[in-house]
Amino acid sequence: MADIFERLLKNAGPLGQHRERAHGYFAFPKLEGNIANRMIFRGKEMIIWSLNNYLGLANHPEVRKADADGAKEFGLALPMGARMMSGNSNNHEQLEEELAAFVMKEDCALFNYGYQGMVSLIDVLCGRHDVIVYDGESHACIIDGLRLHPGHRFVFKHNDMDDFEKQLQRASNLIEKQKSGGILVITEGVFGMAGDQGKLKEIVALKDKYEFRLLVDDAHGFGTLGATGAGAGEEQGVQDKIDLYFSTFAKSMASIGAFIAGDKKIIDYIRYNIRSQIFAKSLPMALVIGNLKRLELLRTRPELKDKLWENALKLQKGLKERGFDIGKTDSVVTPVYMKGGLEEATAMVMDIRENYYIFCSIVVYPVIPKGNIIYRLIPTAVHTDEDILKTLEAFSATKKKLDAGEYQADDIPDMAEVAAKRFDYMMDKPRNK
């Protein structure tokens, strides 16, 4: 019999294999100070492009006050127990009512977390005879929910409507053969890696031809897209055709929690059957109070979304003018595509942090194919023109080095050790930022 722990130690996983060299720098970095456009990383002030604080609400004075007042009045324990048993409150129900109205649905149910919520949502909606059709670039929470699904599932190529219809046809044929079950289509309002919107308008148009229900994960669209900020469905004019609208508080609202909105009878069914909420403690009252304030600001301060888009468009325009490939993004998520291996990506990350004071997330193999590098920039309403200009200049400089082969190396450096030595050196001399 094999020892489970021995197997885990022999194969640490595609990311875990680099943990000793990466921890604290490339992986699990520590950003210090208040959440803002500039924070401290290893003793140095950096321009931060890695936080989903889209509207700048994390440190908005009204939000900070609401959070503090909620914690002072209720603490973090209230309410005790799950919502169904002893953890309900007027404030929880008020937040659900206001969210439903904001996204133009009849009813809404709160979840404690977005990831956990989506996994459990798929479980509660689909039985073993039901078929799920989903986009190939769906978020990990959707994929993990699908792993729990006992029935069939068909994946369609990302935003490829011809392949989507092909998979719908396969699903329909299977349902007809089984003489049981239905079809759930799952896609995203905005795909968080590439920044492109899901083709919701084209998907719902096929409802006239095929019978299915549509679940949309709009984590990155909620608060950033649409005339009122109600998301990708509003942006594309099809919010009323989305059967179940899901989003998280972890992006635009800079908080914790999530929700699902739709027809009242369906939301009631979810509310009384979703295991991740029935068997979990209720969302703490202080978070609910804070989320009510955040939602109020989404409704009443359109200038926050306007400023976010002003910054995002300046950043994206500047990158394109400098010859960078930012793909097909039509959201504020800004990917920058480059060519290079893991060793080159590592060296470039260190250079842009240590010498240009820019902190942004980078994606490499195994998340994307070998030989490719993606910088993923997240603009916010609190970034400044100076932040954008310095970032553009840093990208131009490091891209020139990448193309010249200056980042080529035989191996990945010990980032934590090298960075620590660099930090000690920097502390001994004046810093220019």
Image (cartoon, grey):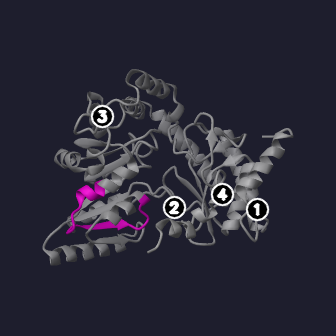
Mark carried by residue 22: 4
Q: Quadrant of the C terminus?
A: top right
Mark carried by residue 389: none
> The magenta stretch spans which residues?
121-140
Q: Earlier in the sequence, mark 3 or mark 2?
A: 3
* x and y percentages locating residue 314 in the rendered image: 60, 46
Asked if labels 2 and 4 touch by Cβ distance under 8 angstroms, the answer is no
Q: Earlier in the sequence, mark 4 or mark 3?
A: 4
Check residue 172 for magenta coloring.
Answer: no
Instruction: Check disc 1 and report the residue beneath it.
Output: 400
Mark carried by residue 98: 3
Q: Earlier in the sequence, mark 1 or mark 3?
A: 3
Residue 229, picture quadrant: top left
Q: Earlier in the sequence, mark 4 or mark 2?
A: 4
Secondary structure found at label 3: helix
Mark carried by residue 328: 2
